Image (cartoon, rainbow, N blue to C red):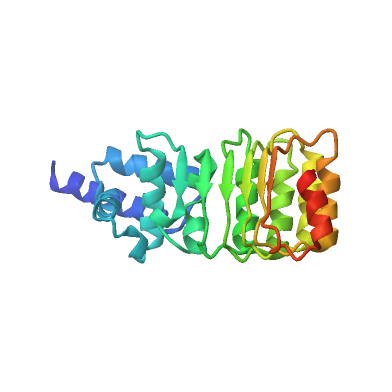
């Protein structure tokens, strides 16, 4: 390789890396990493693979370019994206937002106890609405989603493209208001969700009645509705009725 061609090669690699640092769309980012591969530059990918091998990735503070490299590595892995466990890579909402393309491509997303708020829920709606939608299981337990986050999720659940079968919202500070949103979503798109975990929340008697009424809808296919008696702040009589449904 002549000096001029070598210089041109280096400038091209530098230009592509600058574009990656601009945080482009996931599709654009993957194309840019493919370009780096064609140019035989694997530096960003090798950095991430080193983190993965050492098991220290969840403790590392990644740059935007490194996050993009991680998305590329995970999406182009030979292993099928069956289960995505965010805690392997990050325990933060920023990690979720950075790795959202991986969530979109996975069948199950385990996001329990990762500091997810309504901001993360707003981003997850895209995974629920995507066509085709791959996501079948979503675990958001032990995050402070509150009713505002559940309302956002419900918008995704009610979308006809959503194929989610299992939703876990244990310990997410859900009240009657959030229950009402979930019931509305189940009525809009009733054919897929089979399991809903609302244990360790605070629906109150009225929230429980709303859920019970939703279960009685002939189009509702829900098979398992989980709660912990005595920790849902509803009366014993209402809980018995709820359990019977």
The reply to whether residue 207 is in sight is no
The quarter of the picture where residue 176 lies is: bottom right
Quarter the C terminus occupies:
top right
133 left or right of 242 in image: left
Residue furthest to the left in view is 2
Q: How many marks?
A: 0
88 left or right of 149 in image: left
Q: Nearer the viewer, residue 127 or 4?
A: 127
Q: Position of residue 84 (x, y in %)?
A: 46, 46
15 left or right of 1 in image: right
- Residue at horizontal 30%, vertical 53%? 48
Q: In the image, is residue 226 above or below residue 231? A: above
Q: Nearer the viewer, residue 93 or 245?
A: 245
The quarter of the picture where residue 152 lies is: bottom right
- Residue at horizontal 79%, vertical 36%? 220
Q: In the image, is residue 182 above or below residue 79? A: below
Q: In the image, is residue 115 above or below residue 157? A: below
The reply to whether residue 182 is in sight is yes
The quarter of the picture where residue 59 lies is: bottom left
Q: Position of residue 184 (x, y in %)?
A: 82, 48
Q: Position of residue 142 (x, y in %)?
A: 57, 62
28 left or right of 39 in image: right
Q: Nearer the viewer, residue 189 or 8?
A: 189
- Residue at horizontal 75%, vertical 43%? 158
Q: Position of residue 16 (x, y in %)?
A: 36, 50
Quarter the N terminus occupies:
top left
Q: Nearer the viewer, residue 6 or 227?
A: 227
- Residue at horizontal 26%, vertical 41%? 39
């Amino acid at each position: 390789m002549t000096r001029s061609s070598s210089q041109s090669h280096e400038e091209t690699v530098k230009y592509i890396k600058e574009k990656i640092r601009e945080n482009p769309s996931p599709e654009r980012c993957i194309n840019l990493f493919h370009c780096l591969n064609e140019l035989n530059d694997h530096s960003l990918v090798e950095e991430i693979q080193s983190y993965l091998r050492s098991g220290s990735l969840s403790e590392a503070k990644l740059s935007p370019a490194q996050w993009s490299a991680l998305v590329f590595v995970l999406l182009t892995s030979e292993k099928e994206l069956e289960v995505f466990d965010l805690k392997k890579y990050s325990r933060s909402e920023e990690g979720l937002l950075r790795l959202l393309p991986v969530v979109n491509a996975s069948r199950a997303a385990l996001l329990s106890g990762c500091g997810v708020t309504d901001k993360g829920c707003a981003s997850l709606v895209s995974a629920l609405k995507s066509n085709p939608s791959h996501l079948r299981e979503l675990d958001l337990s032990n995050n402070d989603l509150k009713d505002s986050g559940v309302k956002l999720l419900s918008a995704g659940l009610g979308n006809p493209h959503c194929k989610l079968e299992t939703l876990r919202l244990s310990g997410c500070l859900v009240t009657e208001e959030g229950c009402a949103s979930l019931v509305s979503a189940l009525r809009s798109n009733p054919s897929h969700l089979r399991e809903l975990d609302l244990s360790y929340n605070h629906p109150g008697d009225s929230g429980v009645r709303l859920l019970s009424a939703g279960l009685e809808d002939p189009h509702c296919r829900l098979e398992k509705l989980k709660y912990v008696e005595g920790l849902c702040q509803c009366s014993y009589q209402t809980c018995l009725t709820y359990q019977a449904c």
